[in-house]
Image (cartoon, rainbow, N blue to C red):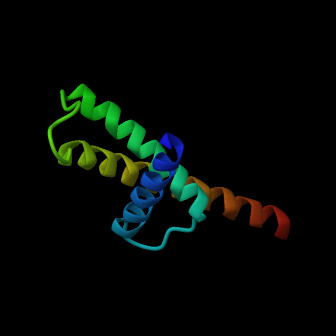
Amino acid sequence: MGWLWAIIVGFVLGLIAKAVIPGKQHSPLWLTTICGILGAIAGNAIARGFGVDETRGIDWSRHAFQLVAAIVIVFFVDMLYTAMKRKRAQRHHA
């Protein structure tokens, strides 16, 4: 159940991150989901570093760290993905 939950959370975080980032992102949905999973992991680690491990109720601050991390990761991975896609297209047209 842990992996299924991680995929669901990663999917949601990735989609929210794509919606927040201005402009169009070109990365596929599977890559966005992986970025969201990585954002959740990184956000948890950062939150733990700030002393936010677990709270009673909904961990809004931990979720905020996860979302910010997912936004940053989706942004940079999409830039890398787009650059690689453009480079591959140039090689095929050369």
Q: Residue at x 27, y 48 (%)?
A: 63
Q: Residue at x 76, y 66 (%)?
A: 89
In this view, the residue in front, 26 or 54, is 54
Q: Quadrant of residue 15?
A: bottom left
In this view, the residue in front, 86 or 66, is 66
Q: Residue at x 19, y 32 (%)?
A: 52
Residue 79 placement (x, y as % from top left): 53, 57
Q: Residue at x 46, y 48 (%)?
A: 5
Residue 53 placement (x, y as % from top left): 23, 30
Vertical comparison of 18 with 62: above or below: below
Vertical comparison of 13 with 37: above or below: below
Q: In the displayed structure, does residue 94 sit left or right of residue 62? A: right
In this view, the residue in front, 9 or 85, is 9
Q: Residue furthest front?
A: 1
Q: Residue furthest left?
A: 56
In this view, the residue in front, 25 or 52, is 52
